[in-house]
Image (cartoon, rainbow, N blue to C red):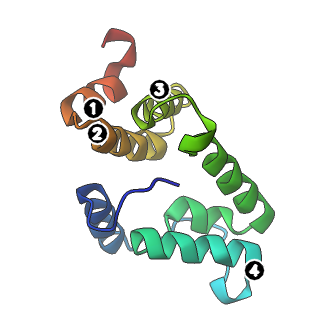
């Protein structure tokens, strides 16, 4: 998980986007947070503290709590600055390009915003997301 502070403009934008979206995030329905296993409930609580909400991808993946737990643990490992020789901007650059190759618009959007936040260059982050082969 990113270490963006709740007062960060990126987090503020995410919060306003989350408030505006009222459509279901999954056809399967979302699990009742009160019934999640403790290790997954702790992840939900951590996201809620850090961002003010539980992201749709985490809520939807929590239908299978073990999958949600494994993905978040993997993500935290990849983005832990103490385990990498890459800067936060380099890690987000890789995430933007990987998301674009995988054609995941949700991930492209979120990692582009994170890349812009850590690099301080919104225009370049957007150009990379839109055509990384030509930047």
Q: Are marks 2 and 4 in contact (CB under 8 Å)?
A: no
**Nearer the observer, disc 2 or disc 3?**
2
Disc 1 secondary structure class: helix
Residue positioned 35% across, 29% down in the render: 129
Please tell me which of labels 2 and 3 falls first in the chain.
Answer: 3
Residue 8 placement, left or right of 29: left
Q: Quadrant of residue 11?
A: bottom left
- Residue tagged by mark 1? 126
Sooner in the amino-acid sequence: mark 1 or mark 2: 2
Residue name at image x 33 percent, y 68 percent:
6
Q: Does residue 133 appear to the left or right of 16 in the view shown? A: right
Q: Which residue is mark 2?
A: 116
Of label 3 and label 1, which has the lower sequence position? 3
| Residue carrying label 3 | 97
1 or 4: mark nearer the eye: 4
Calculate the distance from the C-alpha at mark 2 to the C-alpha at mark 4: 34 Å
Badge 3 density bin: few <14, some 14–19, many ≥20, Cα 10 Å: many
Q: Quadrant of the C terminus?
A: top left
Assess disc 1: are there few (<14), some (14-19) or many (≥20) residues with their C-alpha within 10 Å of its C-alpha: some
The answer to whether 61 is drawn above or below residue 46 in the figure is: above
Q: Of the two numbered discs 2 and 4 on the same chain, state the one appearing first in sequence.
A: 4
Residue 45 is at least partly visible in this image? yes
Q: Residue 44 in the image: x percent, y percent?
A: 59, 73
Q: Is residue 35 above or below residue 77?
A: below
User: How far apart in space, not on screen, are marks 3 and 1 (Cα)?
Assistant: 11 Å
- State the image coordinates of residue 22 (x, y, percent, origin top left): 38, 74
Classed neighbour count for the residue bearing mark 2: other residues with Cα under 10 Å, few (<14), some (14–19), many (≥20): many
Q: Position of residue 111 (x, y in %)?
A: 42, 42
- Circles 3, 1 touching at the beta carbon (< 8 Å): no
Residue 3 appears in which quarter of the rendering? bottom left
Residue identifier under label 4: 38
Find numbered disc 4 in the image and state the secondary structure of the residue it sits on: helix
């Amino acid at each position: 998980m990113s270490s963006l502070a709740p007062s960060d403009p990126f987090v503020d934008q995410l919060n306003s986007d989350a408030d505006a979206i009222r459509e279901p995030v999954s056809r399967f329905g979302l699990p009742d947070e009160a019934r999640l296993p403790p290790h997954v409930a702790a992840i939900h609580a951590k996201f809620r503290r850090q961002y003010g909400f539980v992201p749709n991808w985490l809520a939807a993946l929590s239908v299978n709590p073990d999958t949600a737990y494994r993905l978040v643990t993997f993500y935290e490992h990849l983005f832990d600055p103490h385990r990498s020789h890459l800067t936060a901007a380099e890690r987000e650059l890789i995430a933007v390009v990987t998301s674009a190759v995988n054609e995941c618009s949700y991930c492209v959007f979120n990692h582009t915003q994170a890349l812009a936040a850590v690099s301080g260059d919104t225009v370049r982050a957007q150009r990379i997301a839109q055509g990384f082969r030509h930047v």
